[in-house]
């Protein structure tokens, strides 16, 4: 149920259980002195054991309802993959573009064409050079990309649009190095 509630916290529930005082996230009710929970009068054995469940008809109905609700929420997502064979990495790099930057600009141009606005987006950069590497955020929307998307979505000639593609590809040195800085965990997120 916690997974289903994390997807949609407003989903109705059939279960009304209070949080155990032994749970890490337990908070005492208002007005109650925040005392540590009493230690159990029994020994807790952490060894794994098979659990035998006794399911009442009401519990079975609740589980069935939760499965159905979760399945409905999962089915609301739609994912399709398009294999584009018109050109690839070699064509993009032969024109002086990074394939990743090219695709990011295509996403931004498509979004602007559909919705008429630019959204702040980021892509993760792995910092796997460090112990327990994490991700650092690279902000993909920069002043150059905003200018490009606005020109691309307007009624300019194709030649003028291609000039803007070239201009937006010539980013200032600091902007060009953002992915490299992010991989070194130098805090490029603004």
Image (spheres, rainbow, N blue to C red):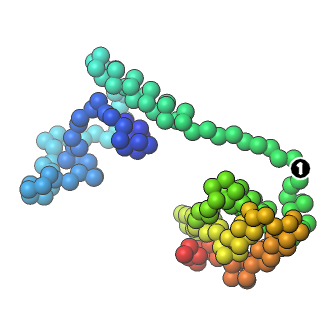
- Which residue is at 86% across, 55% downward? 88
Residue 62 visible within the image: yes
The furthest residue to the top: 57
Task: Choose top left, top right, bottom left or bottom right for residue 179.
Answer: bottom right
Q: Secondary structure at mark 1?
A: loop
Left or right of 179, for residue 165: right
Q: How many discs appear?
A: 1
Question: Foreground residue, 34 or 81?
Answer: 81
In the rendered view, does 93 fall on the left or right side of 37?
Answer: right
- Could you tell me which residue is drawn at 59 percent across and 62 percent down? 119
* Residue at 55%, 64% in the rendered image: 134
Q: Is residue 107 visible?
A: no
Location of the N terminus by quadrant is top left
Tell me if residue 11 comes above or below residue 185 in the rendering: above
Viewer-proximal residue, 111 or 96?
111
Q: Is residue 161 left or right of residue 36?
A: right
Q: Residue at coordinates 14% horizontally, 52% vertically from top-left?
A: 29
- Is 163 rendered above or below residue 112? below
Find disc 1 in the rendering and name its residue.
86
| Residue 17 rendering spot, x and y as whole percentages | 23, 36
Residue 90 sits in quarter:
bottom right
x, y (%) of residue 166?
83, 73
83 relative to 30 in the view: left or right: right
Question: In the image, residue 163 lies at what x, y percent?
Answer: 85, 73
- Crowd around label 1: few <14 · some 14–19 · many ≥20 (10 Å): few
Give the residue at the far front of this rendering. Answer: 155
Task: Return the residue nearer the eye: 56 or 121.
Answer: 121
Position in image of residue 100 (x %, y %): 75, 62
Which of the image's four quarters has the C terminus? bottom right
């Amino acid at each position: 149920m916690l997974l289903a509630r994390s997807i949609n916290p407003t989903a109705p529930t059939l279960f009304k259980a209070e949080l155990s005082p032994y749970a890490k996230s337990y908070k005492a009710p208002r007005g109650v002195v925040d005392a540590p929970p009493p230690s159990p009068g029994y020994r807790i054995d952490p060894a794994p054991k098979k659990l035998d469940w006794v399911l009442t008809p009401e519990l079975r109905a609740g589980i069935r309802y939760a499965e159905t609700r979760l399945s409905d929420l999962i089915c609301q997502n739609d994912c399709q993959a398009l294999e584009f064979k018109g050109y690839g990495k070699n064509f993009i790099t032969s024109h002086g573009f990074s394939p990743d930057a090219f695709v990011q600009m295509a996403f931004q141009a498509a979004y602007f064409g559909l919705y008429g606005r630019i959204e702040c987006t980021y892509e993760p950069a792995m910092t796997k050079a460090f112990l327990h590497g994490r991700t650092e955020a690279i902000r993909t929307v920069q002043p150059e990309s905003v200018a490009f998307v606005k020109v691309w979505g307007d009624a300019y000639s194709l030649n003028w649009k291609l000039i803007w593609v070239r201009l937006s590809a010539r980013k200032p040195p600091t902007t060009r190095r953002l992915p490299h800085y992010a991989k070194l965990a130098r805090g490029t997120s603004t």
